[in-house]
Structure formats: structure tokens, C-alpha cells
């Protein structure tokens, strides 16, 4: 009888952590910033159909980076938990802290399981309060760790240059327009090493706010027209029209979008966003 191959628990956890971090780094970054009237969520997203930012409940938003099919399952789980808790008890009992605890248990269980691969995701659960002091931003990593964030945070992709830029330029209490411009400039710092800052167009962004001044539902998506008005939408460079009469393709800004079956798409199991 052959001796089974032995891997120490420490080495197994290290390999899982490295695997998850590499998968998350292949996605594009997202930034969360507190502004004077709430919380701004900005993600670089080339897809108009696959959302990285969503509403969970009246005052709670969800943002994620990494493998789409995995964080979409987590989003749906959060919506179901919030709906059930709000229906069974009271809408005030649905909190970002409670959802963060539920996500932490799920991610931690999957990460420590010997028979499952870890989720290649980082997520944020944000809740806007009556003032900036009562806002809550919880960041959860692939292993179920929870961090309470304040001011701003960045996840996914090249986080270090983006975080350095925000650390140097963020001032508490900016307006929504100032916070958006800051977030977009910061995301532009997160290109491939040696490329320098990128200009990110409005049609490559997904933006939403939790606005405490709204009457009930605080979550609101920003339209492309609204983004262009704030960012000063410059006309895109025109590309020569194909000879077959089809519309000219949009010129890429920064890295090309993932192709099916590429390393960024996760081998076809769902794109890293």
C-alpha cells in the first residue's frame, strides 16, 4: 500500500491564498470613497451587462472584484438574507455588519475546506448612515477576513499605485463630483508597470452612490451621460470603418478586455472583473 502524499496545513493554506490573490489581481480595480453626502463606488468595468456594483437593500450596496460567477453568487445570497431578515423582523434589522458576518462565515468555510478551491473574490459591503460618522464600509477577502474601512479603500488589480495616489490626494468630505474625479484618476494609476497613468473613459466605468439625502432607497447608479458631464467627456478617437460596413470598433484604453479562454477569463468558468 502506497503512502498518501502529505501536505502540511500551513503549506495548503499558503497555496490557497496565493491562488486566490493571483486570480483577484487579474481583474480590474474598484474604489470606494466616502464623500460629503454618502459613499461613492467606482469600478473599471468594460461590460455593460455584468455588474460589479449592486444594491443589496435600502441603504446597503455591494461591490466586488475577481471571478464574476463567484461574487454574483455571494451577491444573490446577500439579497436573500437581507430580504428574509427584513421581512421576518424589521427593515432596520438589516445592516451591513450582519451581512458582512454572513459573508465572512461563507468565505472562511470555503477557504478552509480541503475539498474546495477558495473563492477568487474581494467584496465590499457598504451602508450609508445619517452622517459620515455612521457610514459603514466592510472589506472582505477570499479567506473571510473582515476589515472596517474609513475614508477610502481599493481592491482588485494593481492596488498599490491606486492606494498610494488616494493616500496622497484624498481629503475628507469631498463633493460627489470631486470624489468621482479623484477615483477615476486613481484607477488610471493602476495600469501595467511602466505604462504610466491611463485615461479611463466614461463607457469603461461603472459608478453608483449611496446618497443619504435620498428619501428611502439610497442606492443610485450614475448614467454614462452624467459621468461624461462630470468627467468632461472627451470625444474618442475614431477608428477606420471596416470594409464590410460594420460599425468601427471602439479603440482600447489600457489593457485589452479579457478574451474567452484567456488566463484572465479563468479558463471559461467566468470572467475576472
Image (cartoon, rainbow, N blue to C red):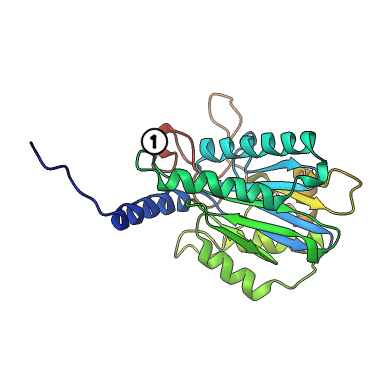
Task: Pick the quarter of the image with the C terminus.
Answer: top right
Q: Residue at x 24, y 51 (%)?
A: 7
Rate crowding at label 1 as few (under 14), some (14 to 19) or many (20 or more) other CA atoms within 10 Å: few
Q: Residue furthest front?
A: 89
Note whether 159 is above or below 113 in the view shown: below
Which residue is situated farthest in the left direction here? 1
Residue 174 placed where, x, y %? 79, 67
Q: Nearer the viewer, residue 34 or 50?
A: 34
- x and y percentages locating residue 58 in the rendered image: 80, 43
Residue 187, quarter of picture? bottom right
Q: Report the front residue among 110 and 181.
A: 110
Q: Residue furthest top?
A: 244
| Residue at x 74%, y 55% (from the top left corner) | 40
Q: Quadrant of the N terminus?
A: top left
Camera sees residue 234: no
Q: Is residue 195 left or right of residue 167?
A: left
Q: Secondary structure at mark 1?
A: helix
Vertical comparison of 168 with 269: above or below: below
| Residue topped by disc 1 | 267
x and y percent of residue 33 in the render? 70, 61
The answer, for residue 159, to whether it is visible in the render is yes
| Residue 263 locus on image (x, y percent) | 39, 42
Instruction: Spot the residue most to the bottom.
Output: 168
Q: Is residue 38 shown left or right of residue 255?
A: right
Amino acid at each position: 500500500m502506497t503512502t498518501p502524499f502529505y501536505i502540511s496545513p500551513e503549506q495548503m493554506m499558503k497555496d490557497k491564498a496565493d491562488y486566490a490573490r493571483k486570480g483577484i489581481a487579474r481583474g480590474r480595480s474598484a474604489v470606494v470613497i466616502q464623500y460629503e453626502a454618502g459613499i461613492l463606488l467606482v469600478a473599471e468595468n468594460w461590460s455593460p451587462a455584468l455588474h460589479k456594483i449592486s444594491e443589496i437593500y435600502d441603504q446597503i450596496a455591494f461591490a466586488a472584484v475577481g471571478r464574476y460567477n463567484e461574487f454574483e453568487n455571494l451577491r444573490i445570497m446577500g439579497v436573500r438574507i437581507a430580504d428574509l431578515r427584513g421581512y421576518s423582523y424589521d427593515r432596520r434589522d438589516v445592516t451591513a455588519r450582519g451581512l458582512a458576518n454572513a459573508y465572512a462565515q461563507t468565505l472562511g468555510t470555503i477557504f478552509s475546506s480541503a475539498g474546495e478551491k477558495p473563492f477568487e473574490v474581494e467584496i465590499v459591503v457598504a451602508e450609508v448612515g445619517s452622517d459620515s460618522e455612521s457610514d459603514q464600509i466592510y472589506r472582505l477577502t477570499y479567506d473571510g477576513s473582515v476589515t472596517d474601512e474609513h475614508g477610502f479603500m481599493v481592491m482588485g488589480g494593481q492596488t498599490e499605485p491606486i492606494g498610494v495616489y488616494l493616500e496622497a490626494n484624498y481629503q475628507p468630505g469631498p463633493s460627489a463630483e470631486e470624489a468621482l474625479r479623484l477615483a477615476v484618476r486613481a484607477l488610471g494609476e493602476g495600469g501595467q508597470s511602466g505604462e504610466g497613468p491611463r485615461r479611463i473613459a466614461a463607457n469603461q466605468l461603472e459608478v453608483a452612490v449611496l446618497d443619504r439625502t435620498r428619501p428611502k432607497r439610497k442606492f443610485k447608479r450614475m448614467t454614462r451621460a452624467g459621468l461624461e458631464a462630470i468627467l468632461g467627456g472627451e470625444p474618442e478617437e475614431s477608428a477606420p470603418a471596416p470594409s464590410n460596413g460594420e460599425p468601427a470598433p471602439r479603440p482600447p484604453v489600457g489593457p485589452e478586455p479579457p478574451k474567452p479562454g484567456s488566463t484572465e477569463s479563468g479558463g471559461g468558468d467566468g470572467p475576472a472583473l
